Amino acid sequence: MIDFWPLIGIAIITIGFMLRLNTLLVILIAGVVTGLIAHLQIIEILSILGSSFTQNRYMSLFILILPMIGLLEHYGLKERAEILISSMKNASVSKVTFAYLILRKVTNAMGLSLGGHPSMVRPLIAPMAEAAAVTENPSITDNQRLRVRAFAAVSENFGNFFSQLIFIGSGGLLLIKGVLNEAGYTMELDDMYVWALPSALASIIIFFIFSKIEQKKAIAVLKASEESEC
């Protein structure tokens, strides 16, 4: 009979993430509990954890980035980014979201974590895009407002997801290198991040086309509204 109890680690990780507990702590507890249920000695469990950390030690390099990020934010990097976006003249939804997408990719390429749905899109980018939409069409409907907010969220997804690996010290790239090395494939970070560039460039072009289509739809709605009033 197959013993499914060692799979309890999956349940622990799932519950821990649902409760939004500390990620590292949840994974360590899941690993230790799984090892104990699989009848491993505590020394053997610690040895496996230590060897896994050593084999994926590249993951710890992100710690070197933290002081640089803190120093730049101390001298107002985020404030300057906000001023740069808010100073755009003749702003439209497509311009605001596309400018944020470019900013997201540039900061990702520098290894800076400047962005995110809760920290940038929700309080800054979505309101700016919505304000630009209202300026263009004061009679904008609630559904159109929601579509503008969703489009601002799309700019974050395009800007972040498709450019996470273009920084040579990114956590995802280091994780991939660790896994490949463990599987016997020798890869250098200098070569790996280059392969992420086509996806990043393609996402810029696709989002630019997508934003232009959305802008044309908004103009068409505005013209239809003006014609109906006449």
Image (cartoon, rainbow, N blue to C red):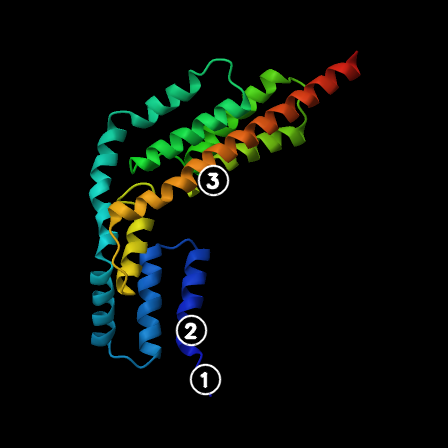
Provide the residue designation for mark 3. 157
x, y percent for residue 112: 30, 36
User: At numbered mark 3, what does the secondary structure look like: helix, strand or loop?
Assistant: helix
Provide the residue designation for mark 1. 2
Q: Residues within 10 Å of mark 2 (few under 14, many from 20)?
A: some
Q: Is residue 19 above or below residue 118?
A: below
Q: Is residue 92 above or below residue 47?
A: above
Numbered badge on residue 7 = 2
Q: For the residue marked with disc 2, what is the amino acid? A: Leu
Q: Are marks 1 and 3 in contact (CB under 8 Å)?
A: no
> How many badges with numbers are in the image?
3
Q: Residues within 10 Å of mark 3 (few under 14, many from 20)?
A: some
Q: For the residue marked with disc 3, what is the amino acid? A: Asn
x, y percent for residue 46: 22, 70
User: At numbered mark 2, what does the secondary structure look like: helix, strand or loop?
Assistant: helix
Q: Quadrant of residue 115?
A: top left
- Is residue 87 shown left or right of residue 218? left
- In three-dimensional space, the C-alpha distance between marks 2 and 1, rounded to whole angstroms, equals 11 Å
Q: Nearer the viewer, residue 69 or 166?
A: 166
If you read the primary sequence from the N terminus, does the residue marked by circle 1 or circle 3 appear first? Answer: 1
User: At numbered mark 1, what does the secondary structure look like: helix, strand or loop?
Assistant: loop
Q: Residue visible at 41% across and 66% down?
A: 12
Q: Residue visible at 26% across and 54% down?
A: 187
